[in-house]
Amino acid sequence: MGMIEEHQDIIHKISGLYADNEEDRRDLDQEIVCQLWKASASFRGECKISTWMYRVSLNTALLNLRHKKRRPQMQQLTEHHDNVTAGTDDQEQKDEIRRLYAAIQQLREFDRAIILLYLEQLAYREIGEILGISAGNVSVRLVRVKQTLRELLGRGLKNER
Amino acid sequence: MKDDDLITLWKQGNYELLTNRRFDHAELEALLTSRIGKVSSSLYLSIVFYTLVQIAAMVLIGFDLYGYRSNVRMLAVLISMLIMCSLFLGYGVFLLNHIRSIGYGCLDVVTTIRQKLKIYRTHYEVWMWIMSISLVFLAFALNALIDNNNGTYPINHPVVFAVGNVSMLLLVYGVQKFAQLKALRHITMYIADLQNNALAESRKLEEAKHRYRIVRLVLLIVLILLLLWGIVKCLQGVL
């Protein structure tokens, strides 16, 4: 439990990206905590704790096949974005953060995982270890994902203007 | 936007988010306590449920063995059913342990997804037939217990009896197969995503969802009409 409490930021970052609304996010938090607790018995320190937690949490988020309640897309995103921009008074920065989160949530589930781990500044080798793909594959996919993200960010900026 | 800018924005966005959302120890324990008893896997639940069905069938067959003890033919049928139920039970226990051993902990995302896919395509396919046969056995054992006529089980219309049992078997299998295909579709989409075919798969998934919505609606309308027709016929008979 101590391990989970210490590294719980990982849980919140992942649930923030994979849940559509606050209710789903709480459900996903709960599911991830439960899976981490169950899996902790078999963790033998063969990798870093953070790597292991990313692996379990992403597995849970990606394989969490639930029926989500239908809510308008903008309403789903606004809740989360208000939380992420609450800490800054700079309006322009707030807008940029909001656009970034909105863009990431439009990516495919697997691409979200890749960009999340990249933005967390994990090494390609570690990203590959978590996702089960080679470091080379990570590098190639990341180029595509970053390009898509930039296009989405550009589109978001155009829509606002 | 440069990569460093993306990372800076991400970190800034996370700062307040994580400050507000941290769980304390008590909250984590509360999350676990409310959840740990529940089984989130529908596959796991299905196996547990039908294992109980097999146990119930075996108990009823036990009663039938006593009730038909002087009927050699029935004894042969019931003993065969009992042996099959025992084998099914063993397979169910094996499957439960196998699913539990995979978990989410030790493996990377891709391997976990592939293992789950393998279970759905192999073991679960076998299990769907086992579920269907178990229900037929349960129904037969119950009917045999109720319709025991001094140690004989009268089958007045053998063809109807056979068709009825086969239909039930196929119906149960069909319903489970439909659910399996739905689950498999999501999982294969993730696998296809790894091979950069995700756009095509996502589009197919959305189209299939739309098609299933229409099928469900049509089925619902047909069932409601059948129900209304049945009620009208009943009322006509009564009046």
Image: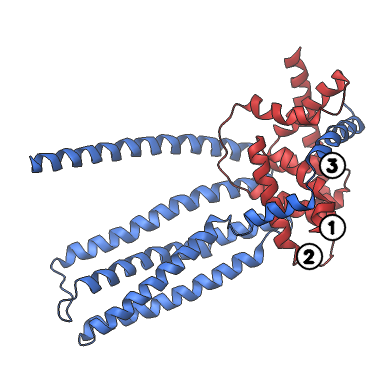
Which residue is pictured at 60% across the width and 38% down the height? B202
Callout 2 secondary element: loop
Q: Amino acid at mark 2?
A: Phe
Query: Where is residue B33 shown, x and y percent of the image?
Result: 66, 56
Which residue is pictured at 38% across the width and 71% down the height? B56
Return the residue found at the far top: A161
Q: Amino acid at mark 3?
A: Tyr
- Colour pattern: by chain
Q: Quadrant of residue B128?
A: bottom left
Horizontal side of residue B213 vs B75, given as left or right: right
Q: Amino acid at mark 1?
A: Ile
Q: Eyeballing the image, is A53 above or below A19?
A: below
Which residue is nearer to you in this view: B103 or B169?
B103
Q: Colour of chain B?
A: blue
Q: Quadrant of residue B60?
A: bottom left
Question: Of marks 2 and 1, which one's residue comes earlier in the chain?
Answer: 2
Q: Colour of chain A?
A: red
**Chain letter, disc 2 residue:** A
Which residue is pictured at 84% across the width and 65% down the height? A46
The Cα atoms of the two marked residues, 3 and 1, are separated by 17 Å
Question: Of marks 3 and 1, which one's residue comes earlier in the chain?
Answer: 1
Q: Eyeballing the image, is B127 above or below A109?
A: below
Q: Which residue is mark 3?
A: A118
Q: Which residue is mark 1?
A: A49
User: Do the numbered discs 2 and 1 sit on residues whose CB atoms are within 8 Å?
Assistant: yes
Question: Of marks 2 and 3, which one's residue comes earlier in the chain?
Answer: 2
The lab-note entry on whether marks 3 and 1 share a chain reads yes
Q: Residues within 10 Å of mark 2 (few under 14, many from 20)?
A: some
The lab-note entry on whether marks 2 and 3 share a chain reads yes
Q: Which residue is mark 2?
A: A43
Which residue is pictured at 35% across the width and 35% down the height? B218
